[in-house]
Image: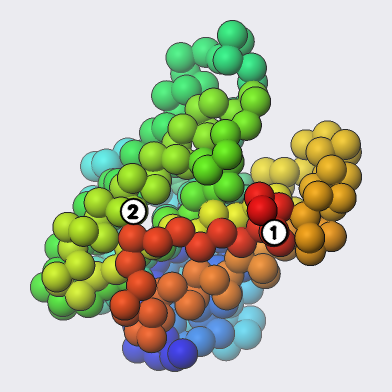
Amino acid sequence: MSFEGKVVVVTGASRGIGREIALAFARKGATVACVATSEAGASGSVQAIEAEAGKAKAYACDVSDSTAVDALFNRIQADLGTPAVLVNNAGINRDTLLMRMKDDDWDRVIDVNLKGSFNCIRAVTRGMMKARYGRIVNISSVVGQTGAAGQANYAASKAGLFGLTMSVAKELGSRGITCNAVAPGFIETDMTETLPAEMRESVIKTAPAGRLGLPGDIAPAVVFLASEEAGYITGQTLTVDGGLTL
Ligand code: NAI
């Protein structure tokens, strides 16, 4: 599974799961466009990749801003060439009970997680269609499959990604483009750092794997779905949760 000569775009690549995904592609020979909200964050991942003699370039962009996303993909095209792979990993949560959820909590989470993925897919597909090749992987969540109290906005955004994934798969399949989703369970990152200790304990007790997940558990699933070899898999969700939702 080589990505030599391929341009891979990873959003939310400054830390956590996104950084691990970016590193995994670089280790397979890809040139990785690391996208994050801040230039400094994205540059940190580029330095980590370059320290391993990999190839990467940093880009700052808010994926919820469609004009900025169009400009981002024009820059990537000019700097690196046509992307073969897009990984929509950028995501946020603003957890609170429904009755306390502000309009802005709802809008922002949907805008980043769901519309951000749509913005990037729309911007990347012109080049992929011309090349008659593309791999798109959307990072959803098991919460999009099960729902979660206190996460109505987040769960809705992640469930929405399944509909987006299947539609893109149907619309672009004849052009050599696949679109799949990965649904991680509980992964140890900055996003989950603040969750209560009881929740962590409960995951460890419930999941057959008997532990929390790590960013390194997610990256190989993404790399596989983005490989040439996975060309007959499209519109699917690969759950990577240590069996938590069984
Ligand atoms: P994180 O909070 O550590 O990293 C999020 C990344 O997204 C950062 O690089 C940040 O700069 C970027 N980002 C946030 N808003 C952005 C925006 N508007 N534009 C561009 N980039 C933006 O999160 P983590 O845990 O690494 O999560 C990565 C993805 O995996 C997210 O989509 C998250 O929803 C999903 N996920 C995480 C799980 C977990 O347990 N940590 C479980 C299931 C899904």
The answer to which quarter of the image holds residue 73 is bottom left
Name which residue lies at 47% across and 41% down. 158
| Left or right: 237 in relation to 94 | left
For mark 1, what is the residue? 243
The front one of 224 and 31 is 224
Q: Is residue 74 visible?
A: no
The front one of 217 and 147 is 147
Name which residue lies at 20% across and 67% down. 173
Where residue 171 sits in the image (x, y, percent)?
17, 57
Up/down of 137 relative to 143, above or below: below
The front one of 161 and 124 is 161
Amino acid on which the number 1 mark rests in the picture = Gly
The front one of 168 and 46 is 168
Label 2 element class = helix
| Left or right: 151 in relation to 205 | left
Name which residue lies at 57% across and 39% down. 146
Amino acid on which the number 2 mark rests in the picture = Thr
Q: Residues within 10 Å of mark 1 (few under 14, many from 20)?
A: some
Q: Residues within 10 Å of mark 2 (few under 14, many from 20)?
A: many
For mark 2, what is the residue? 165
Where residue 78 sits in the image (x, y, percent)?
23, 70
Where residue 84 sits in the image (x, y, percent)?
30, 75
Up/down of 71 relative to 64, above or below: below
